[in-house]
Amino acid sequence: MISSRANKPQLARPAAPESKLHPRNRHRARYDFARLIAAEPALREFVERKVHDEHGEPSIDFANPAAVIALNRALLNDSYGIHAWELSPHSLCPPVPGRADYLHYLADLLAASNGGVVPRTKTMRVLDIGTGASCIYPLIGCSEYGWRFVATDINAAALANAQRILDANSQLKSKITLHLQASSQAVFKGVIADDDWFDLTLCNPPFHASEAEALEANRNKWAKLGKHDNVESARRNFGGEGAELWCEGGEQGFILRMIGESARIATRCFWFTTLVSKATSLPAICDALKSANVVQHKTIAMRQGQKQSRFVAWTFLNAQQQEGWRNLRW
C-alpha cells in the first residue's frame, strides 16, 4: 500500500472478468489509459515505459510510487472531477478503487437501515478517523453521494496537505471539515461534541504495532514485487510513516479502543465502522462488541482482485431509536 492511514462512470473498456469490486464502483473496468492520460498528462511517461499487464495491455509499474500517484491523480480527476490532488513526502498513497469500494459498501449498510435507499440528505454527516494527507474518503464520498464529512487526524502536516487539496476544489470545500485530534490515545474523544450527530463513522486504522513491524511488512511487499533494493527504497515505495502505519497495540488495539470510546457516545452515531485488515483480529473485536452491549454488529466482506478485505460495523441504537433517527435525519 502506498495512503493515510491506507471514478466516474465506468471506463470505456469492458469490465475485467476477474473484477470483484462493488457493482457501483466506477473502477471495475480495466484502466483506459488514453482517457486517463487526457485527464492527467503526467501519467503518459509512466505508461509509455511499455509495461504490460497479464492481459497484454499497457499498464504502469505499481512498484513505482510516482507512477501510482499519477494514476490516482488521473482517476480522481477523470472519475470525480477532483483537481490538484497532491501528497506530501512519505504520505501513504491510497489505491483509489479500494477506497471507493469501502464507501459503496457503507452506502449499502445505510440503505439496509433505510428501506433500501441510500441517504443523501443535506444533514448526512460522516466522520473519517485518520483521514491523512490524501483526504481520500471524504473526497470520494462527497463526490459520489453528496455526504458531508468531518475528517480527523493527529498529524497537523497531513491536515495541511488535505486543506490544500480542498482549497483547489471549491465544490467540495464547504462539505468537508478538517479537525486536528490532539491526543494520540483518543479516537472520538475531543472530536465529537455534545451537540454533534453522525450517521456514520469510517476508519482505516494503522496496521502495525511498531515501526519495525511496519518496515518488515514493507520489505516483504518489496520482495514480492521482485525488487531487491535497500530498506530506504522500500520505505519510499510503500510510503506512510508514524501513526499512519503503527500504533500501540496495532490494528487490534486501536479498534478495541475505538469500541470502548464508542460506547460513551452510543446515541451520537447510527453506524460505527472500521476496516479490519487481519482476520485474526476479528474474534477479539467481536468479544469487545459483545462486552460493549451493542445492539447489532456486522462483518462485511469485500473483495478487490485477489485481496480479501472486510469491515466491522456496529450500532447501539435499538429499533425504535433507529426509526426515530431515520425520520429526523433521512
Image: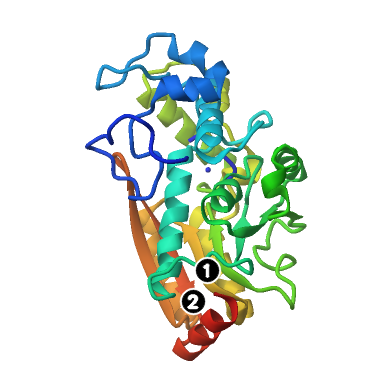
Quadrant in which the C terminus appears: bottom right
Q: Secondary structure at mark 2?
A: strand
Q: Is 61 or 181 nearer to us in this picture? A: 61
Residue at position x 70%, y 73% in the image: 196
Q: Residue at x 63, y 37 (%)?
A: 241
Q: Position of residue 49 (x, y in %)?
A: 43, 8
Nearer to me, 273 or 245: 273
The image shows a total of numbered marks equal to 2
**Residue 187 image point, x, y percent:** 65, 63
Residue drawn at the location 61% of the way across and 70% of the way down: 198
The residue under label 2 is 315
Residue 272 tag number: 1
At label 1, which amino acid type do we have? Phe
Tell me the element at label 1: strand
The residue carrying pointer 2 sits among few (fewer than 14), some (14 to 19) or many (20 or more) residues within 10 Å by Cα, namely many
Q: Residue at x 36, y 19 (%)?
A: 226
Question: Within 10 Å of the Cα at label 1, are there few (<14), some (14-19), or many (20+) other Cα atoms?
Answer: many
Whether the residues at callouts 1 and 2 have beta carbons within 8 Å, the answer is: yes
Snapshot quadrant of residue 327: bottom right
